[in-house]
Structure formats: structure tokens, C-alpha cells
Image (tube, rainbow, N blue to C red):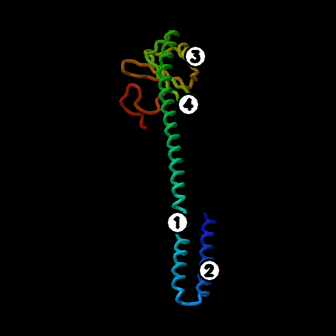
Amino acid sequence: MREELYEWVRNLAVFYILFTAVLHLVPDKKYERYIRSFMGLLLIYMLCAPVLAVFGKSRDLFRDFQNSYRSEQERMEEKTAENLQIFYLTRGYEKELSGKILETMAEAGIKAADASVNIEGERITVTLYVEQELSEEEKGEMLDVLGRDFGVEEKDCQVVVKRNHETAMDRPASSGTSAGSDRGSGF
């Protein structure tokens, strides 16, 4: 772009020098008017040529921009469709895994009311809702089953005991209402 601009300015300078030289070489002043008109038309053409060239190239630029925009839009739509597909597959897998965990817990003799599974990347977290407090032996067996059969680490397991509309958890709550209380935790 910069070189084209220098070329254009150089051509204008050469044209002006040539124009002045031709005017000095004209033998009669009555022809000077015609030469000035002709050289003026040439000067207008030389001044407009870059603008016309840009308009000629602007169609190419517009077409390139349009193609680039269209391909970027298609790529974004593909990415959105992939993300949506992954979301629904993950949610379906979470639901299926919840059912399998409940079946496995029933086979192991642990009475679970519900299981909630959350998958984020490679990490699987499980919240198991039971109707009565589990003994240490039952908790250990539950953690072994979840780790062995489902690849859930101990730190990603949580047991929630449901008792007549009250809920007690084996880990302290970080926010929200505490068990058996209507007061918030202050966060």
C-alpha cells in the first residue's frame, strides 16, 4: 500500500514537470488553452485512478470479507452444535449413571433414595441421598463401589441423609441454609 502511494505521488510529480515543460514549448499562446484542457483531463484521470482502482479492488475485498465471514459463521455454528451435542450427551450420561449407581447401591445393600451425578470434563461428582445414617463400614463399601465401578474418587463423593424434610450432610455446608434452620450461613 505504501509503495503504491509513493508510485502515485511520483507519477504526479513527473506529470507536473512534463506539463510545465510542454507549456513552455508551445509556440503560440492560443494553443496553450487547449493543452491546459487536455493536461487537466489527464491530471483528473491520474488523481482518480487510485480511487477507481480501490473501487475495483473493493469488490474483491468485499467478496473476500464475505467469504471469510461466511466460513467463520459456519465454524461457529459447527462449534455451537458440537457443544450442544456434548451437553445433551453429558446430561444423558449423568442420568444413566445415576440409575446405575442406585442399582449398584441396592445390590450392595445400601438403601439410597436418589443419586445425583455431575460430570465436568474428566471429573465425576456424586451426591448420594440416603434415608438413614450410614455406618463407617457402609460408607467405606459405598466409596469402594463408586471408585471401582464408576471411577469416582472419594473426594468427589457426598452422602446426604434425608430425615422428615430435614437434610444432614456428612460434610459442612459452605453456603445456603444450615440443616434444620431457616437462617443463611452469612454468605
The kind of residue on which mark 3 rests is Asp
Q: Residue at x 52, y 69 (%)?
A: 48
Q: CA distance from mark 1 to mark 4?
A: 54 Å
Mark in front: 3 vs 1:
1
Mark in front: 3 vs 4:
4
Q: Earlier in the sequence, mark 3 or mark 2?
A: 2
Would you identify the image quadrant in which residue 142 lies?
top right
Q: Earlier in the sequence, mark 3 or mark 4?
A: 4
Q: Position of residue 39 (x, y in %)?
A: 55, 78
Q: CA distance from mark 3 to mark 1?
A: 72 Å
Would you identify the image quadrant in which residue 144 lies?
top right
Q: Earlier in the sequence, mark 3 or mark 1?
A: 1
Q: Earlier in the sequence, mark 4 or mark 2?
A: 2
Q: Residue at x 51, y 47 (%)?
A: 69
CB-based contact (under 8 Å), mark 3 and mark 4: no
- The residue singled out by tag 3 in the image is 149
Mark in front: 2 vs 1:
2
Q: Which mark is residue 18?
A: 2
Mark 2 secondary-structure assignment: helix
- The residue singled out by tag 4 in the image is 121
Q: Residue at x 58, y 19 (%)?
A: 147
